[in-house]
Image: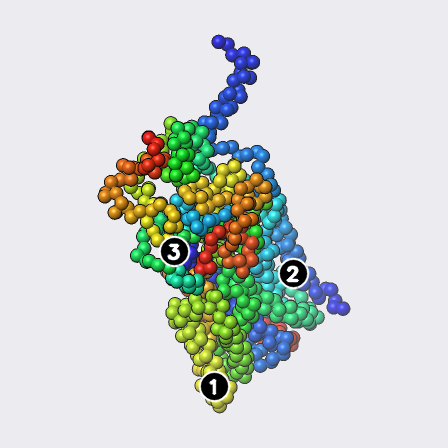
Amino acid sequence: MANLKDAGHLFRMAAVFAIGIVLFLVLRAIFVPKTFGQYGHYRAAAIAEVAARPVMFAGHQACESCHTDVLEVKSKGVHAHVACESCHGPLAKHADDPTALQPPHIDVAVLCVRCHEANIAKPKTFPQVVSADHSGGMVCDTCHKPHSPKIDSGVSQ
Amino acid sequence: MTITRRRLLMLLPAAAIAWDSILAGTPEESPNYKMTDHWWGMLIDVTKCIGCGTCVQACKAENNVPDGYYRTWVERYHVAKWDTEMPQVDSPDGALHGFPPTKQEGGKNFFVPKLCNHCADSPCTQVCPVGATFVSPDGVVLVDQKYCLGCRYCIQACPYGCRFLNPETETASKCTLCYHRITKGLTTACCETCPTGARQLVDFKNPNDPIHKFLETHSVQVLKPHLATRAKVYYYGLDGSVR
Amino acid sequence: MYPNEIELQWSVLIVLYPFLTGLVAGAFILASLERVFRVDAVKPTYRLALLTALAFLLVAPLPLQLHLGHPERSLEMYLTPHTSSAMAMFGFVYMWYLMAVLVLEVWLDYRRNIVVRSQTTTGWTRWIYKVLTLGSTNISERALAIDNKVGWIITIIGIPSAFLLHGYVGFIFGSVKANPWWSSPLMPVVFIFSAMVSGIAVVMLIYMFMCRVRGQQIDMRCVDTIAKYLFYTFLIDFALELLDLIHRIYESDESFRSLDFMVHTKLYFPHIVIQILLGTLTPILLLAATQVLPLNAARRRVTYGIAGCLTLIGIFAMRWNVVIGGQLFSKSFLGYTTYKMAFVTREGLVVAIVLTILPFIILWGLVKLLPPWEETHSLDLSPVALAHGDD
């Protein structure tokens, strides 16, 4: 068994390591976030942070609670299942305070063709036209009322 | 008219209801939302997708997605004859502005929307070195923006290419299944604005969820099943050529 | 291409990182040849190999830190390591290897020199030596015998630790099932052997270079032995890479067509020309020639020099082809992208070059501080030697 005196330097090195480990444990106690590990290996508070993001689209039920007249027309037409904000864009701010934000004016020529421009990849049963040939340059809502687009639907706007 | 205590007590509930309708656009976080009551996923009906890109625009608006990066996107497939090995696929700007018409005739052509599959056995959360990305108790794969190092290992590990590094925050980012909406009883931005109902949010733990019936009666697939990620985005009508 | 795949995630810095840790592991294995396997011939390179390993290991975390989006959060990897993540556990493997193996071994081997120098040198370096002694000036025969024994044990532990160090890097890539260019059980093994090849080559080159600089005669027996080990290790490494290639071609799974096309087009120059032809086959042939043909010492030195340089280029190219190559093709197997290497940004070429040169600068400093060309761990305890210090 080696004389312990001659191994003194090894004990000093061991002490350096021990100090390092203690320092590590202290850092751990200070810096690991408090909610870490609550549900799994992550900071549980992050879930609430993600959930706290502001909502931009109100959802069609919010629109329908005020705009019952439009709902009346739309629910009888082929656009019944198209959400309001699909065309009108994100309007949660408008639903919160209708006077503060007016829904932006829609450029009909751009909007309608987004869905209805003919494309070979669209389902065959989906109504689509080659817009250049279809209306002779007239904009879509000249003939089609967007909330109930079928021309022979008999509903007047 | 003096305001008596009684009058005030009668006015308060009326004020509350009025206040609620004023705040109709931004519902309060439902205090009854219990994470363990939910297990979220999505159903995508490929036969209904028209490639309009409204979902991509809605996601961008809802989640402030930076330009050139995509939390969701739509791919257009052209399968000549029946060759599932070599389809031609394009996704111009992630289909943010829809698709330009093609000259191609013939073959099978269809659109496939894609997003994070919120895998139950997700390979991306497995490799995160610090626990900055995780599967929440209600089945949504989320990223802790304050904890992520930006090492990009999760982006490498995702087989579906749904992750990216947000250049503004220098952290990993991806579809959160609009967690901030679904916890308030709303649906995701993409499902809300999809004009044909091709995208539907599903709560696998909710027995009243109407999609359960569909899943039980139709053939559905997930992407890359051989990787056993237990993806929770189910596709109906998925062709064998879809990668 | 999936839209998010167009931009590469891991840059040239992440190519540099396995290259540097590979040099560490390889240099250490060379050092252990002498210490544990008693290959006397390579004794002159023992200390140099250790210092080389240390210099490269100190620089290795730098490319990683520069690559991170939030380097200030990197301590999280140690505070809340995700045990299922190879990258997180690697942080501890690195720390273990640095502290418990390399630093300890260097310290134990140099302790006598450190103590003597703490008493004999003048100027500010005296304080460095004083700190390094940890306050103990015991260099008696018994103390040094203990150092020798402990050092030997550490080297024994160090060999699997070196394998673990670089094998882990291989595993970080090899365990990613999403990427078929990376996902392979062979990946850690290939990384380890290519690491050994590069580490042995770099020590050989540094040794020959330093002998030249110091005007010392190159110990041919030493260099011949190193070259022999380099040759054999290279053969194993090449066999492993061939095995991976043959296996891919034969099984021809869904990824094969896409990867094959990539190797023949985008990766043609880095993979076929640089890695295989210039970086593997040529050095192997050169080294084989020195084993088989009767070349004189001068010719052998030149051959070793060329072979060594080509080896390093080849192994760097291998890292490039793995890291960059793995990101050039789409996970849909239907498309490719391009790596646009930046020049002066945080992850650019300039930074990569600086980080490659930096370990040599650190090595220069270490060599000045702890000269390797004195007697190694053999105990020359004659009073004359002790009194004269180590110059």
Label 2: element kind: helix
**According to the image, label 2 marks what residue?**
A13
Chain letter of mark 2 equals A
**According to the image, label 1 marks what residue?**
C289
Inspect the image, locate mark 2, and give the three-letter code of the amino acid beneath it. Met
Q: How far, Cα to Cα, is label 1 from label 2? A: 48 Å
Q: Nearer the viewer, residue C143 or A148?
A: A148
**According to the image, label 3 marks what residue?**
B109
Vertical side of A145 occupied by C196: above or below: below
Inspect the image, locate mark 1, and give the three-letter code of the amino acid beneath it. Ala
Tell me the residue at 53%/34% (across/down): B29
Q: Residue furthest left?
A: A136
Inspect the image, locate mark 3, and give the three-letter code of the amino acid beneath it. Asn
Q: Nearer the viewer, residue C167 or C335?
A: C335
Q: Percent position (x, y) of residue C281?
A: 45, 79
Q: Percent position (x, y) of residue C126?
A: 55, 62
